[in-house]
Amino acid sequence: MYRLLADATMVLHFGFLGYVTLGGFIAWRWPRTIVAHVVAVAWGVLIVVFELDCPLTGPEDYFRKKAGQHGLPDGFIDTYLTGVVYPAEHVDLVRLGVAVAVAASWAGLALTLRRRRRAPRDHPPPAAPPTPPRGSRPAFAARRRPRRC
């Protein structure tokens, strides 16, 4: 059970990192999600700048130890990414890449929203159907058969 919880926390952690990196592109389709993305990016920046522990690291470490595994000795990113996915000496380059992806997604969102606001209305809203003259019967009434007794 603890291993399952540890793995679920790890997946959630990877999901958060993916959202920090690419969540701004989601806002191109659903602009209201930019608020959540700004909060996630701000949290990620705080963690990096002030060298804070992510709140997900502690629970994953705890669940791994309870499952009889080694915990996270150096934190989530240092355990799963640095030295595994990219060389440790390229940490700053990876951070720059994430910052560029975030900036590009936000710039793209700004352009998308600007285009939507300026887009001409090609088709005016459909006009209401004409109202029949007062006292006339609806079209479906003309097709009814008279009742027979």
Image (cartoon, rainbow, N blue to C red):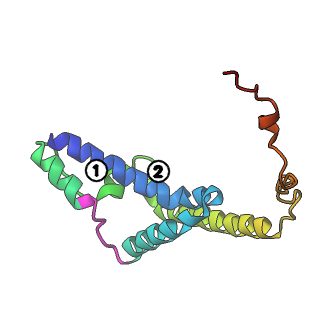
| Residue pointed to by mark 2 | 86
Q: Residue 101: give its label.
A: none
Q: Can residue 72 be seen here?
A: no
The residue under label 1 is which amino acid type?
Thr
**Magenta stretch, main secondary structure class:** loop
The answer to whether the residue labelled 1 contacts the one labelled 2, judged by CB atoms less than 8 Å apart, is no
Instruction: List x then y, in percent, for residue 1.
Output: 15, 39
**Residue at which label 1 appears:** 9
Quadrant in which the C terminus appears: top right
Depicted 93 relative to depicted 38: above or below: above
Q: Earlier in the sequence, mark 1 or mark 2?
A: 1
Residue located 34% across and 73% down the image: 51
Q: Which residues are magenta?
A: 50-57
Q: What amino acid is labelled 2 in the image?
A: Tyr
> Residue sitting at 17 percent across and 47 percent down?
64
**Residue 76 higher or lower than 118, as above or below:** above
Q: Give the farthest residue toward the front.
A: 149
Secondary-structure class at tag 1:
helix
Magenta segment includes 52? yes
Query: In the visual, does 121 lie left or right of 5?
Result: right
Q: Position of residue 22 (x, y in %)?
A: 55, 56
93 or 135, nearer to the observer: 135
Q: Position of residue 89 (x, y in %)?
A: 45, 59
For mark 2, give the secondary structure. Answer: loop
> Going 83% across and 65% down the picture, which residue do you hit?
119
Q: Is residue 62 left or right of residue 149?
A: left
